[in-house]
Image: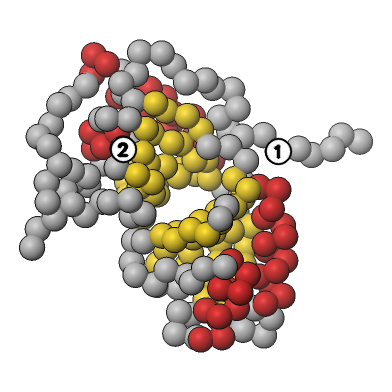
Amino acid sequence: MSEPYYESPLAHVAEPPGLYVSIREIPDRGMIDLRGLPGDNGFMAAARQVLGVDLPTRPRTSVSWGDIKVLWLSIDQWLILCPRAKAPEVIASLKEALRGIHSLVVDVSDMRAIIRIEGDGMREVLMKGCSLDLLSGDYGAGTVRRMRFAEIAALLHVIEEDICDIYVFRSYASYAWDYLQATAREPSRVRLFGKQAAPV
């Protein structure tokens, strides 16, 4: 009998030439959906015990500790990122630490693909497909934002000034990749005004 195996939805693609930003997949990431009440001190303490860092409670933010990142998704939901091979261990530890506490821990590693966009012009490429003003001062490193990108649901995580990851559902990964290839080609570059300070 054949054995099941994991394959990325973008395993068949390679970074194309002629782009003014770098586009590549971030493979082999474990993704864990964690839900609980931020007002429950027991829940927050148990999560910190396992992850080594406090869960972010400020909307649209993220934190990291070693090879673990935690993204705020909603008032009671976080996305935990870690090496794929480490995910089962983290899940087991979370379930044990949260035993008896109102919470939910689910492995969603196969749910999304992660595409990294890097380089000067990263924000302009993204703005072609969404309604966010990424040149404002509201999108610094660590920012997390759900968005509609190229007419599909996506999650934006700003890593550095000119580096971001976008998370798309697995079934839309190839579409998102093809869209980015088309909009990031040098002939389609749009030079917008410079980055603006956040409104006071």
x and y percent of residue 30 in the render?
61, 50
Disc 2 residue type (three-letter):
Asp
Say left or right for 200 vs 50: left
Q: Amino acid at mark 1?
A: Tyr
Q: Nearer the viewer, residue 187 or 61?
A: 61
Of residue 125 and residue 159, the one placed in the foreground of this image is: 159
Task: State whether residue 188 appears in this view.
Answer: yes
How packed is label 1: few (under 14 Cα within 10 Å), some, or many (20 or more)? Answer: few
Furthest-front residue in view?
66
Q: Which residue is mark 2?
A: 162
Q: What is the secondary structure assignment of the residue under circle 2?
A: loop
- Where, by quadrant of the figure, is residue 162 drawn? top left
x then y, percent, for residue 47: 57, 73
Q: Which residue is mark 1?
A: 6
In this view, 180 is above or below 112: above
| Residue at 49% in and 44% down | 169
Above or below, 138 relative to 44: above
